[in-house]
Image (cartoon, rainbow, N blue to C red):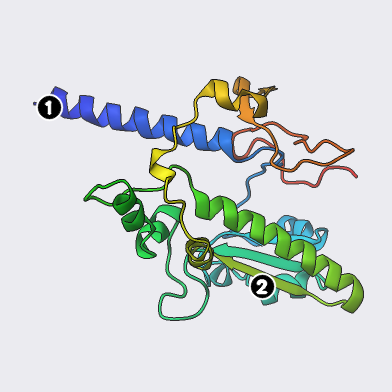
Amino acid sequence: HKSAKISRRLKHTLIHGLRNIIKILAFPFGLYRPRTNMRDVDDQLKALVNDCHVFVQGYRPGALAGLKLSGEEIARIRPGIIHASINAYGSCGPWGGRRGFDSLVQTATGINAMEAEAFGEKLPRALPLQALDHASGYLLALGVMEARRRQRLEGGSWRVEVSLVRTAHWLRSLGRVATGPKHPAPNFESIAPWINECESDFGRISYVAHAAIFEKTPAYWALPPVPPGFHPAIWLTR
């Protein structure tokens, strides 16, 4: 019995470990990935903030304020900065400040129930991808670009906030495709035109190409995925 428990635990660790590796590979394309101690707001971290134009954070509302890194404190360290944040349920309202992530917000907003209904299933069914994370990320980037535009005209420091729950309500408002469940699942051959390859610290990997398509300048990521803490906590030389 003891060996069976160890075997199950090992299987759980391997499965979830592999899932985490896949997430590490899937998301940090083009990112410079240093690691620093957020509980120690030292001169190095302040120097990094002082030399940047945009500060992006994804902690629950109020979490960084307890570490003396609130939006107001960031703006005090670096006047004229854009403070961009993404959270689960917003920073106000009855659920404001709650911890959460994509899958929980899918459940809270009824998306999982809608998916189950569409597929004729009784148990909640998750979307086949983290749609709230992806859509919210693009909306946050759009908000930052608009803040930069207005900053050039009006000056000052700006705050941009996106919540997964608001993105979920927006996506639900777009309606559903009635024949969605009948659509065949894509296979590797059908998406091959949108797949690229590159060398990385994990070896040679295949990945979905950049979503943006420009007429003259191809969109690409300058850096491949790397593990957290791979780079030193300094800005690249411009």
**Relative depth, front residue between 186 and 182:** 182
Q: Who comes first in sequence, dot 2 or dot 1?
A: 1
Q: Residues within 10 Å of mark 1 (few under 14, many from 20)?
A: few
- Dot 2 falls on a residue whose secondary structure is helix
How many marks overall? 2
Q: Is residue 208 above or below residue 188?
A: below
SS assignment at label 1: helix
Residue identified by numbered label 2: 71
Q: Residue at x 68, y 69 (%)?
A: 160
In the displayed structure, would residue 225 be above or below residue 172? above
Identity, as a three-letter code, of the amino acid under mark 2? Gly
Q: Point out residue 8 in the picture as x, y percentages from the top left corner.
A: 22, 29
Using a 10 Å C-alpha cutoff, classify the residue at mark 2 as few (fewer than 14 neighbours), some (14 to 19) or many (20 or more).
Answer: many
What residue is rendered at 43% in x and 29% in y?
Answer: 18
Report the residue that reaches farthest toward the bottom: 93
Question: Residue tagged by mark 1?
Answer: 2
